Amino acid sequence: MIIIALDVDSREKALELVEDLKGKVSYFKIGMQLFNSQGPEIISLIKEKGVKVFLDLKFHDIPNTVAAASAVAVRQGADMFNVHASGGEAMLKGAVESAKETAGKLNLKEVPQVLGVTVLTSMSQEVLTRELGVNKSLDQQVSDLAVLCRKAGLRGVVASPREVSIIRKSCGPDFLIVTPGVRPSWASRDDQERVHTPAQALALGSDYLVIGRPVTAAPDPREALNNILSEIP
Ligand code: C5P
């Protein structure tokens, strides 16, 4: 139930973290920082260690382009990847259908999981209303976008722990909810504003916790991960 965010520039550091932490982690997340510095081959280098990869590039473009990019992500070995829910239903369906079709052509045992990003957790009600012109509460917007993702066939969404209960209510028990912004009680908040402990996020109904710096920037990442796991009932 843990996803480790490999937010580092260096290939050596990323591979060292994977080697140190594998076995206790469900997915290793490659975001824009690592992908842009190391290129797509970082996916296969990490997968050679026998672990699963979540490619966090948040695709958002016209449906044809997102479908094509999704096929490439699946060919490169992503086990999970994400798209912006605000790209609309045709774009979301394009990603899901392309992932299924490519997985079929490659005879993959499992179709990679496609997740939607609803409203970025860095965005406030003020920004949503004044800058983007969305005349709904932030919670309603998150819920509506999660429902759209579900309708389009996505496996789940990435959301803040504070939005988990509203998404559970609108999308049901089988929809995956992946939550960043998780901090063990002993760790620094860094730049995360609204944080929950791992136990709180799981109690709210989160399926996977995305954890970066509390583990990756710790003097002993393996010990930090063990401490987090020991906090989870
Ligand atoms: O280091 P930290 O635990 O804050 O890392 C959280 C990870 O989750 C980062 O990779 C960040 O990009 C990602 N994330 C987030 N908030 C979101 C979406 C993704 O912090 N709304």
Image (cartoon, helix red, strand yellow):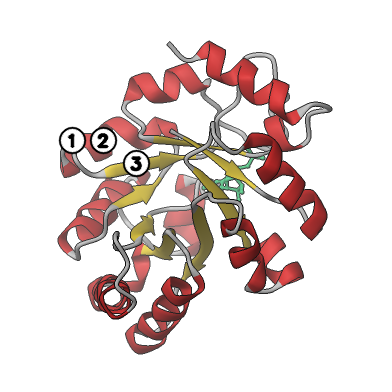
CB under 8 Å between discs 1 and 3: no
**Horizontal arrangement in the rendering, residue 135 relative to residue 25 (left or right):** left
Q: Amino acid at mark 3?
A: Ile
| Picture quadrant where residue 181 is located | top right
Q: Amino acid at mark 1?
A: Pro
Mark nearest the camera among 3 and 2 is: 3
From the image, tell me which residue sits under label 3: 177
**Horizontal arrangement in the rendering, residue 11 relative to residue 35 (left or right):** right
Vertical placement of residue 200 versus 118, above or below: above
Vertical placement of residue 45 versus 226, above or below: below
From the image, tell me which residue sits under label 1: 173
| Picture quadrant where residue 60 is located | bottom left
Q: Which mark is residue 166?
A: 2
Count the marks: how many?
A: 3
Label 3, secondary structure: give it: strand
Q: Position of residue 30 (x, y in %)?
A: 60, 57
Vertical placement of residue 143 versus 87, above or below: above
